[in-house]
Image (spheres, rainbow, N blue to C red):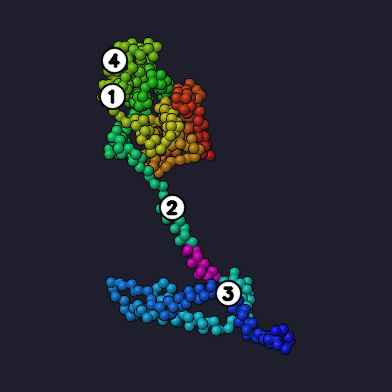
Amino acid sequence: MAITDENKPALIKPSAVQVKGGAEMATRKVVGVETRSNRRVLGAINQNLVGGQGYPCVVNKRGLSDENGICDKNLPVHGHRPITRKYAAQIASSQKHSSEENKKPKIAAESFSVWEDDMEENEAANDKPVPMSLEQTEKVSKGKDQMEVEMEDIFEEAVIDIDGDDAKNHLAAVEYVGDLFANYRTMEVYSCASPNYMAQQVDINERMRSILIDWLIEVHHKFELREETLFLTVNLIDRFLEKQGIVRKKLQLVGLVAMLLACKYEEVCAPLVEDLVLISDKAYTRKEVLEMENMMLNTLQFNMSVPTAYVFMRRYLKAAQCDRKLELLSFMLVELCLVEYEMLKFPPSFIAAAAIYTAQTTLYGVQQWSKTCEVHTTYSEDQLLECSRSIVGYHQKAATGKLTGVHRKYSISKFGYSAKCEPAHFLVQQTQQ
């Protein structure tokens, strides 16, 4: 049938309510899933917060009174903790207090006028006395300073256990090493020569002694002897000359015999008497060497076992955690001290510590003495400074003059060219200033 204007179905215009509802439905089709899921989640949360059962109460061995709050299953849960009766009352009162504050109108003009009054009062603030709040600030600052000092004490340098790595080494004698060096420190007082013994000698002086020891250092190096042999040789010479007067022409013989005795005590294969006669350009005979050996042993009462600077050098270098370069430079400096007569006023342990301290200062360019070194040597940096400056002076003139045996010895590759290190001039300059 043909559709005419008369039989056309009537078009019904949608009302405003229907249009609005359709838009909502369209919107719900797009985000409806998320909306419904969010509503379910929120509903679950609301159910947990309002109608759900709280978390189980934590039971304590001591019972809680009503005043402290007893867990009630019927009370809601606030956050992650069950709300007790007392805690619920506190929440309600806080919410009431916050709602009352929000209802109060805020007066901007009133706060602005107060700010203007404060600006006017600040102009005359200098005339008023200092408020007590500043005193409290000073107390707080003092408390911070005290805290910093306490923190410095907490982070104080720790003393390293230098024998920990040798616990399984039986030759290191870790169990007895402390007692051994305590005994060495006691015995070194009785095994040193007097620093003024040259006043008793008639035909020799300090300069001759220095020339003798400088020559013996070259002989020691030529025979490739052990390091401890050199230190014991010098000790025997000084102790013998302290008790026995010697003419000038016998002084070299004293040095050769002292080295012979030290070799018999320290070396596995000691040099022969003929070798010593030959090294002296046959200035003495075999008989003279043996006679001097007999006289020296009787004068020293056969007391050959004495702590020298070498014994302490090995221990203190271990405390300093030295490398090969520091070790060689330390021995070069301590051998320079052997040549100098004025160094007899210091005990061997002190000279060893001062030589290591000077070597560290020379290599690193700064004055360095760790807590570990101070504990094991029992000498502080201030105590070593005077002796260290003297050692720097010997280092400065080691390559000049006639006494250059130590400098030549340490100028070869075997000793790491230690003689080429620049002395620590700034230590001497500090005294001059």
**Residue 14 visible to the viewer:** yes
**Numbered disc 4: secondary structure:** helix
Q: Which residue range is magenta in the image?
A: 129-140
Q: Is residue 75 magenta?
A: no
How far across and down, in percent of the image, does residue 284 sit? 35, 12
Front disc: 4 or 3 = 3
Q: Look at the numbered disc 1 and give the secondary structure of its residue.
A: loop
Name which residue lies at 45% across and 82% down: 93
Q: CA distance from mark 2 to mark 4?
A: 64 Å
The residue that mark 1 highlights is 300
Label 1 and label 4: CA atoms lie apart by 14 Å
Whichever of labels 1 and 2 marks the residue nearer the N terminus, that label is 2
Q: Position of residue 4 (x, y in %)?
A: 73, 86
Residue at mark 2: 152
Query: Label 4: few (<14), some or many (≥20) within 10 Å?
Result: few
Residue type, mark 3 in image? Lys
Measured Cα–Cα span from mark 2 to mark 3: 69 Å
Relative placement, left or right, of 412 versus 307 is right
